[in-house]
Image: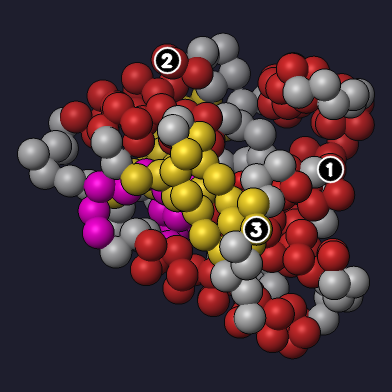
Amino acid sequence: SKKIAIAIDGPAAAGKSTVAKIVAEELSYIYIDTGAMYRALTLKALNHHIDLEDETALVELLLHTKIELQKNGKNQIVLLDEQDVTIDVRSQHVTNNVSYVAKLPAIREELVNRQQQLASHRGVVMDGRDIGTRVLPDAEVKIYLIATVEERAKRRYEENKRRGIPSSMEQLIKEIEERDRIDSERDASPLVKAENAIEVDTTAMSINEVAQFILDAASKLI
Ligand code: C5P
């Protein structure tokens, strides 16, 4: 059957990666979590105490940084310069700083290049903020996942609880709104629905319903 590219974009904590992983698994496609790449660079910059407004220093750092996304069973591991940082890139500290790194045009240019190389063969599910608009503008299926901020914070709260991480709903709502604001207001490929993307409001949908919706959309083309 024909192999296609599926682009999944949307605001923070809308369930993109969970759903993307299921869809990729079902189709035996590769899954590429582009947010993990911005997070890995942010983690390294924080560890090296680099000023997150210093674009030149960050680009220099990125050019000496190897970021690999590997499959490990049903999960995805993130390697930063050969080190497993899968857990570290999800920390609160990285989450609250990543949007400052991701808004820098020269950083985006380099990471978008790497992402396009990773997706140079069809048979790919990629999630992020600018996949349908910038990274894979000719993706056959473009999905824009949304949900109310309360629902997204609730999902993140439950996920944290399962992982034993304490959090407050009020704080989560604030952090999600702030990240969406920075991601949407930046000049370099901001978070926006691609013209030909299908918008799916997942507020009242289960993970499997969302995955099935995307698989149905894809099945018409493969
Ligand atoms: O998807 P995730 O929440 O892991 O993304 C972390 C951050 O990385 C986003 O808030 C955004 O600032 C940035 N990002 C981006 N473009 C992408 C993927 C992520 O700007 N394609």
Residue annotated with mark 2: 209
How far separated are the C-alphas under marks 2 and 3?
A: 35 Å
Residue at 67% over, 40% down: 12
**Which three-letter amino acid code belongs to the residue tagged 2?**
Glu
Residue beneath disc 3: 83
Which of labels 2 and 3 is toward the front? 3
Q: Answer with left or right where residue 117 lies relative to residue 86.
A: left
Direction from residue 221 to residue 94 in the image, left or right: right
Q: Residue tagged by mark 1?
A: 92
- Between label 1 and label 2, give the one nearer the viewer: 1
Closer to us: mark 3 or mark 1?
3
Question: Residue placed at 76% from the left, 60% from the top?
Answer: 43
Q: At label 1, which amino acid type do we have? A: Gln
**Ligand 1 within 8 Å, label 1 CB:** no
User: Circles 1 and 2: CB distance less than 8 Å?
Assistant: no
Give how far apart the Cα atoms at labels 3 and 1 are: 19 Å
